[in-house]
Amino acid sequence: MSTNNTASNWKSKLHEIIYEADTPSGKLFDVVLFFFILASIVLVMLESVNTIDAKYHTILYYGEWIVTILFSLEYIARIITVRKPWKYIFSFYGIIDLLSTIPMYLSFVLAGSHALVALRALRLLRIFRILKLARYLGASNQLANAIKASRAKIAVFLFAVVIASVIFGTIMYLVEGEEHGFSNIPKSVYWCIVTLTTVGFGDIAPETPLGQLIATIIMILGYGIIAVPTGIVSAEYTKAADDDNKNKISDEERKHLENINLNTQSCENCLTETHQDGAEFCFKCGFELHHD
Amino acid sequence: MSTNNTASNWKSKLHEIIYEADTPSGKLFDVVLFFFILASIVLVMLESVNTIDAKYHTILYYGEWIVTILFSLEYIARIITVRKPWKYIFSFYGIIDLLSTIPMYLSFVLAGSHALVALRALRLLRIFRILKLARYLGASNQLANAIKASRAKIAVFLFAVVIASVIFGTIMYLVEGEEHGFSNIPKSVYWCIVTLTTVGFGDIAPETPLGQLIATIIMILGYGIIAVPTGIVSAEYTKAADDDNKNKISDEERKHLENINLNTQSCENCLTETHQDGAEFCFKCGFELHHD
Amino acid sequence: MSTNNTASNWKSKLHEIIYEADTPSGKLFDVVLFFFILASIVLVMLESVNTIDAKYHTILYYGEWIVTILFSLEYIARIITVRKPWKYIFSFYGIIDLLSTIPMYLSFVLAGSHALVALRALRLLRIFRILKLARYLGASNQLANAIKASRAKIAVFLFAVVIASVIFGTIMYLVEGEEHGFSNIPKSVYWCIVTLTTVGFGDIAPETPLGQLIATIIMILGYGIIAVPTGIVSAEYTKAADDDNKNKISDEERKHLENINLNTQSCENCLTETHQDGAEFCFKCGFELHHD
Amino acid sequence: MSTNNTASNWKSKLHEIIYEADTPSGKLFDVVLFFFILASIVLVMLESVNTIDAKYHTILYYGEWIVTILFSLEYIARIITVRKPWKYIFSFYGIIDLLSTIPMYLSFVLAGSHALVALRALRLLRIFRILKLARYLGASNQLANAIKASRAKIAVFLFAVVIASVIFGTIMYLVEGEEHGFSNIPKSVYWCIVTLTTVGFGDIAPETPLGQLIATIIMILGYGIIAVPTGIVSAEYTKAADDDNKNKISDEERKHLENINLNTQSCENCLTETHQDGAEFCFKCGFELHHD
């Protein structure tokens, strides 16, 4: 198991920079990456604006290539420094990292007159790189738990909303008819969800008195039932906080725990993060952790 | 009471398949039924889209007939296997099951040139079959209780919203008048509910400064009072969870209860569901339960 | 003080019918009144619809007169049977009761060619009669207390919303300008409130990229701060329920209290309601209560 | 340190009037200032309405000058009476106080034919004077704490909303395209936020069936996730109230504390407010407080 300990120094150094955020160089890498992700999103956005694209097409084009090459290099570096590359490649972030680079390269292979539009679409997939930002959220665990606890109930609730929309949508189709924009049931259901969720675009609006009466019922229903998911999350969150209170540790235990520090070092073998400061082996897979 | 025990075997077998969800065949039946309900809704929806109906009219027509016949067979099977057919026929689901089949048959009897449009409407009633989906929600009892507890208060709240809408609607009718779309009081009240519930279609919008000032008050009111039903449901839900906590059983009791299993077997006599696994008689009406 | 005890029997009988809801005749009176109020509102609404008014003008006109005369008789009866008429006349309901009858009479005195439109407006004031419905809400006290407790905080919150709207409204006026519908600051502020409260009519919408960016900020702000009043009411409501729990009386006390029955009898002198069943004198003013 | 004690009497008197709200004259100053701020905002608003400006231009112009001069005098008085003027000048309110006066003076210096429009914009900055109103809110501390406690979580939540908007906005751009108003990605993202926050202007609305389906998902998502910030604030608020309860002081302590009165006197040296009634020196910087 200690064979890897003799691995080339630059590899383990690079791994530290890319995968950890505790060392100064690792921190710098994350911040720089963060700004490159933001820049790549802004580039894609600006390119889609016709007036800007017409003016600065060359700059945007080269900017896109710089970002693509940098992301490619980062992708390769991630594969090299990780001990189980396939695990990374097929992980959620691995796939996103790949998808954020390939569209640009594909634009060469599939270069045709009409295919270019479709390629532009593929290129836009790079926007998914933004999901990388999720890594930097971190402290939102508490929030995530509250949502997870009430997920099932909110699903049932949203399902009820959809059923109500289908029923009311059908009724509105019969009442208003095609001449008032409710041209078919799917469109009526769409309108019903627009109304029930209190969005109210106004692209379609009931015009007959009966249609407006039913719309009134839908709106008051939508205004009233918004209380349900809110009440659920609120109650679950309060409950979670209470449980947290009950599970509070004694002062002595806290003192002991405060002496333990966790860092963001990640295992080269299984990618597990947050090891204790003095840890010699990964607590998940037992692989030996390297130190400087 | 045990006379029914000697009833034809296929009848009790069919009853088990249709009304219970514990046996493999019963489970399969429910899943198949669920997909047929979904398919029938999609059929009705597609039929209402002119471009799709023009292209695939024959397929949709036959699809509709297949669904109608299958639903009819299911309806007849339900009546035959239940001991008290009239109880089922006049139950909520019994009426919905019937309404989801008859429109298609009525289209023969009432076939006329102009009546067809109305018949199409009748056919659409089949959409109510979707309510059958409610059966599959099951676990939403906790949610239902929270809503039930705050029902009265939310009703009072919604009533206050309607009163406020009538008063503000009348004022807006006087202020804006017919030339700005507020052509009569019912329409003004309709607009007021659209605004108060924060839907805001924009089909009618105040144009005079005074009208816009009053609209501002209505919107802020609507934005503020949404807090009321939400607060109620949230508090009731928290309270229900607390009560749940207080009523928690001891570990010994729990152990005892864990040995009792409830199944979805439903009584042939009174349709009551969820009997204990070893139960010989219905706990509601005392009718002998059959076993395989 | 007991001189009134010898008052004409019909007067005290009438008082009982009008002001109390415990006796069968009193209950009947309230229900009949409730339906007449509803009918009067429907009449005013239908009259405002041109097509209906053109067809059924005479019926609506006579219906209006019947309601007006009945309301007038009720108003007179209320004054006669109360011991301190002026207190009733200048009470909230006294003024509303008067305002719901006079517009119809005024239409005679002020009959002119152009003044008629204004009179129609006065007539519409009768809609305020609807406020009488509030009397029948009754059991919403708990709700009212929760709102009362969080009133001050919600006021501060709504004030902050208005300030934010003024600032953002001014910025939007500068950014979008008159050519995009933001023709002056009050209108911009109106648009800002429409957006912040998530109503979104769409009669005015930002068209410049910068305007749309600021609109985005306003919308996310509005979407986020709706949480504040909701959180307040929810917390206050939970707290009120907890306090209620702590103040719960012992079983013995409850038994004692259960033997005391309150009725809706109202004092002829000070109009205070809900006296105990065996009460001889008003608990507020000491005035002797009459019994049948 | 006591040299300042011999400072000119009028200076310390003026300081008391401007910076404190306990003395009758100080209270009067604050109320008068409050109404002048309101008046200045109304003036700027009316001026932006073309029809009103055309009619009453001279009155509005002089009114503006009166307000500007009064605000300037107040600004100078604040600088003179404070011991560390630079600290005030670069404080939040110091900058706002300055910005609410300079635009009017700048309109002389930069008077040109085209620059006037821009100047008008500068003048409108005076609206920021409204922020002074925040001083009068005071008692909203409890609310502020609840918001502060859930600030981080709401920020994470709003960040997630923005990320979702960017992803869905890009998808909608690809699905709907330029011909349906989704002319570029930033505009699509804007539309997505309009929809997700349930505002729904309707200036842009999906027209393809697929676009409407995705819009449906966005709306239901927006309708469901509004529950998250609400639940957080609600839970934090409840928790804060509970903590408040636990930290309640004993009756003896309360008696002691009740004998201590805090006033709004503010230190001339460091501007700290709320000293105890008998205090001789500032509790923050030790500077001697003057008394009448």
Image (cartoon, coloured by chain):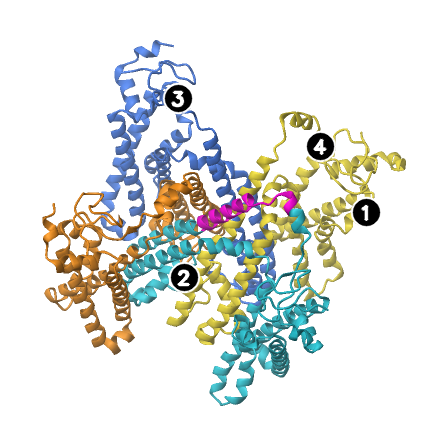
Chain colours: A cyan, B orange, C blue, D yellow
SS assignment at label 4: strand
- How many neighbours does mark 1 have within 10 angstroms: few (below 14), some (14-19), or many (20 or more)? some
- How many neighbours does mark 2 have within 10 angstroms: few (below 14), some (14-19), or many (20 or more)? many
Q: Circle 1 is placed at which residue position?
A: D85
Please check whether the numbered discs 4 and 3 fall on a single chain. Answer: no
Q: Circle 3 is placed at which residue position?
A: C252
How far apart in space, not on screen, are marks 1 and 4 (Cα)?
25 Å
Left or right, A155 with reference to D259: left
How far apart in space, not on screen, are marks 1 and 2 (Cα)?
55 Å
Name the residue rendered at 25%, 36% in the picture.
C66
- How many neighbours does mark 4 have within 10 angstroms: few (below 14), some (14-19), or many (20 or more)? few
Q: Circle 2 is placed at which residue position?
A: A202
Res B31 → quadrant: bottom left
How far apart in space, not on screen, are marks 3 and 2 (Cα)?
61 Å
How far apart in space, not on screen, are marks 4 and 3 (Cα)?
47 Å
Q: Circle 4 is placed at which residue position?
A: D262
Residue B217 visible in the displayed image: no
Q: Chain of mark 3?
A: C
Q: Amino acid at mark 2?
A: Gly
SS assignment at label 1: helix
Q: Amino acid at mark 4?
A: Leu
What range is drawn magenta here?
A230-253
Q: Chain of mark 1?
A: D
